[in-house]
Image (cartoon, rainbow, N blue to C red):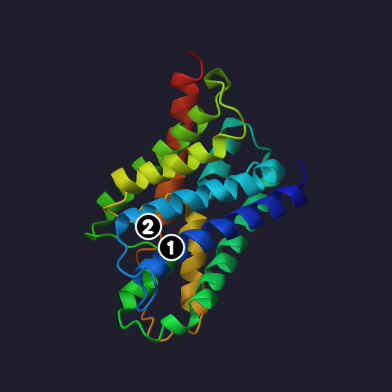
C-alpha cells in the first residue's frame, strides 16, 4: 500500500459515499424533488447502498475505510501503518467535501424552492432530535462501536465470506445501524461524512441556508472516534481470539 493509493482510494470512496448518501437526503427533503417526503426508510436504505458502492469501488485500492474512525481504529490495532494515516484522512475529508459540493450542484434549482433552513443543513450534516450533548455523544459512540465490531466480524477469516460479498454486508450493517440507532442523532458514525459536508454547507452559496450548527459539530467527530476505538479493541480482545 502506498500513500498515493491510500489517498486516491479514500478520496474516491468517500466522495461516492457522501454524494450518494447526502444525495438521498436531498432527494427526500428538498422541495419539488421526485423523492420528496420519502421518509427515514428511504434515507437509511440510500446510505446503506452508498456505503456498499463506495467499498466496492475503493476496496481494492485502499481497503475503503471511508471513515477516519475506521482508519484510526485499524491503526490502533496495528493493521494500518501510522505513516499512511495522513493520506487516509486527507483523502476522506477532501472526498467528503467534494461529494457534498456535487450534491449541491445536482440539486441546484431546488435549494431556492425549499424554505426550511434546517432541512437544507440536514442534507449535509447531522443534528440531534433532542439536543443533549452527553446523550448525543453516547449514541454516536455506541453506533460507531457497533460499526467496527460488525466490520471486523464480517471480514474475519473464520466467517468464510467471499471478498465480493463483504461490501454488500457492510452496507447492510450501516442500513441496520440507521434503522436501529439513527433516530437520536442521525447516525453520523463517521467524522468525514459529517465535518467535511458541514464545511461545504458553510462555504457554499446555498439560498436561505441558515447557520451550520458548529456548536454541535464536535459530537459527530469525537463520538465516532471514541466508539470506533472501543469497538475495535473489544472485538480484538474478546472475539477475535476465540
| Residue in view at x 54 percent, y 56 percent | 17
| Residue in view at x 26 percent, y 53 percent | 184
| Residue in view at x 43 percent, y 44 percent | 174
Q: Which quadrant of the view contains residue 97?
A: bottom right
Q: Is residue 112 visible?
A: yes
Cα distance, mark 2 to mark 1? Answer: 6 Å
| Residue in view at x 71 percent, y 54 percent | 8
Q: Is residue 66 visible?
A: no
Q: Residues within 10 Å of mark 1 (few under 14, many from 20)?
A: many
Picture coordinates of residue 108 (x, y %)?
Answer: 49, 81
Picture coordinates of residue 240 (x, y %)?
Answer: 50, 20
- Of all residues, the one furthest to the top in this rendering is 242
Return the disc, 2 or 1, that comes first in the chain's sequence. 1
49 relative to 111, above or below: above
200 relative to 182, above or below: below
Q: Residues within 10 Å of mark 2 (few under 14, many from 20)?
A: many
Q: Contact, CB < 8 Å: mark 2 with mark 1?
A: yes
Picture coordinates of residue 32 (x, y %)?
Answer: 36, 79
Disc assigned to residue 163: none
- The one nearer the camera, 87 or 156, is 156
Q: Report the residue marked by disc 1.
A: 24
Picture coordinates of residue 190 (x, y %)?
Answer: 47, 51
Task: Give left or right: position of 234 versus 117.
Answer: right
- Where disc 1 sits, the SS reads helix
Task: Give left or right: position of 195 versus 143.
Answer: right
Q: Report the residue marked by disc 2.
A: 43
Name the quarter where the N terminus is drawn: top right
- The one nearer the camera, 20 or 92, is 20
- The one nearer the camera, 207 or 1, is 207
Task: Give left or right: position of 23 versus 183.
Answer: right
Amino acid at each position: 500500500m502506498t500513500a498515493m493509493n491510500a489517498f486516491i482510494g479514500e478520496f474516491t470512496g468517500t466522495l461516492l459515499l457522501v454524494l450518494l448518501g447526502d444525495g438521498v437526503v436531498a432527494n427526500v427533503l428538498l422541495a419539488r424533488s421526485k423523492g420528496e417526503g420519502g421518509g427515514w426508510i428511504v434515507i437509511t436504505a440510500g446510505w446503506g447502498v452508498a456505503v456498499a458502492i463506495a467499498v466496492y469501488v475503493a476496496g481494492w485500492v485502499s481497503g475503503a475505510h471511508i471513515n477516519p474512525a475506521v482508519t484510526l481504529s485499524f491503526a490502533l490495532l496495528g493493521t494500518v501503518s501510522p505513516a499512511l494515516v495522513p493520506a487516509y484522512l486527507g483523502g476522506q475529508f477532501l472526498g467528503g467535501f467534494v461529494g457534498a459540493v456535487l450534491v449541491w450542484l445536482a440539486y441546484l434549482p431546488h435549494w431556492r424552492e425549499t424554505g426550511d433552513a434546517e432541512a437544507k443543513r440536514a442534507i449535509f450534516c447531522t443534528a440531534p432530535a433532542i439536543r443533549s450533548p452527553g446523550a448525543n455523544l453516547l449514541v454516536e459512540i455506541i453506533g460507531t462501536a457497533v460499526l467496527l465490531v460488525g466490520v471486523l466480524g464480517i471480514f474475519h477469516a473464520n466467517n468464510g465470506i467471499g471478498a465480493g460479498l463483504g461490501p454488500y454486508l457492510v452496507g447492510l450493517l450501516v442500513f441496520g445501524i440507521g434503522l436501529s440507532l439513527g433516530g437520536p442523532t442521525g447516525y453520523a458514525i463517521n467524522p468525514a461524512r459529517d465535518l467535511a459536508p458541514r464545511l461545504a454547507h458553510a462555504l457554499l452559496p446555498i439560498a436561505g441556508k441558515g447557520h451550520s450548527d458548529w456548536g454541535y459539530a464536535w459530537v459527530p467527530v469525537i463520538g465516532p472516534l471514541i466508539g470506533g476505538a472501543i469497538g475495535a479493541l473489544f472485538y480484538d480482545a474478546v472475539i477475535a481470539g476465540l
